Amino acid sequence: MNILGIETSCDETAVSVVQDGRKILSNAVVSQIDIFAEYGGVIPEVAARSHLEAMLPVLHKALHDANLDWPDIDAIAVTHTPGLLGSLLVGTLTARTLAILHEKPLYAVHHLKSHIYANWLVPELLDPSEGQKTPILTGSTPTFPLLALVISGGHTQIIHMNQHNYFEIIGTTHDDAIGECFDKVAKILGLPYPGGPAISKLALSGDRQKYHFPHPKMPHPLDFSFSGLKTAVLRQCQSIANVDIKYPSHDIKNLLTPEQKADVAASFEQTAVDILLEKLSLSLGKYPVKSIVIAGGVSANSLLRRTLSNENISPDEYSFQNTPVFFPEPKLSGDNGAMVASAAFYEIQSGVQPTDPYKLNIYPRSAIR
Ligand code: KG4
Ligand code: ZN
């Protein structure tokens, strides 16, 4: 079954064709990162306008790369929640129009579900005989019950899944998401948006033990809070620069040396990863599971991957307290259409019915169900 997946919830215009939920036949993505790097964050109006410009070329590229035409497509899937209102509108209106025009069943998918299902997609391996990248269907898939650690720019949650398409949120953030915290700390240090990759890069030359940032104590132990960590980083920078706590956060970068910035980045990244592992450990104590899946943009983080990898077995194999850990292929950690198609495939397998293309609504905020 070939599903065309469309994703426009934030700042990536992405369309992909995936066969049977796992095999990526094409994966076209146009990112607006270059536009927003200098602003230090996404501007919703600009994002929506950019999606409009990119949508048709990206759609054509996805069909062209898959070497398919509309008769070969069995269903259309699109992100309808959560995300930026204008951005979601462009993706859903495109999907609704295509579903009506080509008479295809339409599936509306929750964005966090898609991030989780990126772990079912097969990594592209270099096939030396053909000299090109081809999906190789040998990888194992996560087994149930499982815990999904969803770490993105807008969400930080631990989700328990007994089976496909069953989601029980067992931990969530009370304030900032972890990716948002990476982005805000990057801004303090004068690094471009998105902050995660920039912090990781700078942290490589820093001392991870130089500064000690607090681990928040939550009333519900599996919940998260990241706004205090961001403030602690700001206070540390103000203290290094020997200025008052009223000193503006956007100017502090000019008072720090490159070494000081690298040490702050490294100590912050270490704390963020330690907090994630602490919560995973607590969750595993309460929910003994067969696998752990890491999902969302922050799953690209190399310190997190390095910490969980079994270097002595294989750098591509991960485990935590003897439970196998699944990561998406790094380029599928961020937003893409393939994960939307995969999530829709497993919804269909679970008996979910298509949605009415004349009535599909968007919801900028909603919990995974
Ligand atoms: O999942 P995603 O692409 O979009 C949302 O659904 O929010 O996540 C984007 C977030 C950004 O906050 C970005 O800074 C973060 O993922 N991110 C990273 C890394 N790559 C992206 N955070 C830490 N380390 C990274 N390597
Ligand atoms: Zn996302």
Image (cartoon, rainbow, N blue to C red):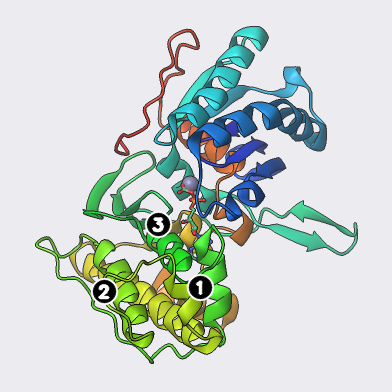
- Neighbor class of circle 3 (other Cα within 10 Å; few <14, some 14-19, many 20+) is many
Secondary element under disc 3, as helix, strand or loop, is helix
Which image quadrant is residue 181 in?
A: bottom left
- Place of residue 281 in the rendered image (x, y in percent of width and height, measured from the top left): 27, 72
- Neighbor class of circle 2 (other Cα within 10 Å; few <14, some 14-19, many 20+) is few
- Place of residue 175 in the rendered image (x, y in percent of width and height, measured from the top left): 25, 54
In the drawing, does residue 355 fall left or right of residue 276? right
Q: Give me the disc on residue 245.
A: 2
Quadrant containing the N terminus is top right
Residue 119 position (above or below residue 82): below
Earlier residue among tags 2 and 3: 3
Cβ of mark 3 under 8 A from ligand 1: yes
Earlier residue among tags 3 and 1: 3
Name which residue type carries label 1.
Arg
Alpha carbon distance from label 3 to label 1: 19 Å
Secondary element under disc 2, as helix, strand or loop, is loop
Q: Which residue is mark 1?
A: 305
Secondary element under disc 1, as helix, strand or loop, is helix
Alpha carbon distance from label 2 to label 3: 22 Å
In the drawing, does residue 364 fall left or right of residue 283? right
- Place of residue 129 in the rendered image (x, y in percent of width and height, measured from the top left): 90, 61
Quadrant containing the C terminus is top left
In the drawing, does residue 180 fall left or right of residue 13? left
- Place of residue 204 in the rendered image (x, y in percent of width and height, measured from the top left): 56, 83
Q: Give me the disc on residue 180.
A: 3
Residue 342 position (above or below residue 89): below
Name which residue type carries label 3.
Glu
